[in-house]
Image (cartoon, grey):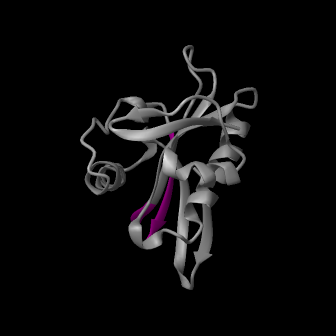
Amino acid sequence: MENVQQKHAGLKAVEWHWFRMAEMQPELLYDLLAFRESIFVVEQTCVYQELDGRDKTALHYLGLRDARVIACLRLLPPTAKETRVRIGRVAVAVDWRKHGLAASMVRKAIDKARSEHPRAGVFLDAQCYLRAFYESLGFKVCGDEFLEDGIPHIPMEL
């Protein structure tokens, strides 16, 4: 587990932590899953199976303020089927957007992916409207646009 603090827009510090699922207290795990559901299912009005079984092997990067999840992402390790590290479930609370948290999180995830799996590439499936954001972080499109749960995505890699 890693703890880093970052001040933003004159607000109290955001605490950043890396966790494996088994390291999370039940209340924190619940809060993380409820946070993701509030964004990916409710806010984006997208009915899909948010709990996909992959959280068990993922590293989770959480931004907490006053013990409340305000930002998250997960890193999925390489597998026999996919030899790259996948960044996914990148989310920031509405009132914390446009403050650089997502970019900071993705950069930390890239660093973590490279340190944990130095020979593996890094990739993600970006919602199409975020293409320029991920390109600004060094990602390049590596495939054709596709629909995932009714939302246009594009595969990108470093």
Comparing 91 with 59, the one in front is: 91
Q: Main secondary structure of the magenta part?
A: strand
Q: Is residue 126 visible?
A: yes
In this rendering, is residue 150 above or below 102?
A: above
Q: Is residue 60 visible?
A: no
Q: Position of residue 76 (x, y in %)?
A: 53, 33
Question: Residue at the spot x=62%, y=58% of the render?
Answer: 103
Q: Position of residue 13 (x, y in %)?
A: 55, 75
**Res 55 → quadrant:** top left
**Res 78 → quadrant:** top right
Q: Position of residue 127 (x, y in %)?
A: 48, 45
* Residue placed furthest toward the right: 119
- Is residue 155 inside the magenta stretch? no
- Is residue 69 inside the magenta stretch? yes
In this rendering, is residue 22 above or below 34?
A: above
Comparing 62 with 151, the one in front is: 151
Question: Residue at the spot x=49%, y=36% of the render?
Answer: 58
Question: Residue at the spot x=31%, y=39% of the render?
Answer: 50
User: Number of labelled discs?
Assistant: 0
Comparing 22 with 110, the one in front is: 110
Q: Position of residue 89 (x, y in %)?
A: 45, 45
Please state, as top left, top right, bottom left or bottom right, where the C terminus lies in the image: top right
* Residue placed furthest toward the bottom: 10
Question: Residue at the spot x=62%, y=71% of the render?
Answer: 6
**Res 83 → quadrant:** top right
Comparing 13 with 95, the one in front is: 95
Does 120 sit left or right of 46 as displayed? right
* Residue placed furthest toward the top: 80
Highlighted magenta segment, given as a residue range = 59-70
In this rendering, is residue 21 above or below 97?
A: above
In this rendering, is residue 137 above or below 119?
A: below
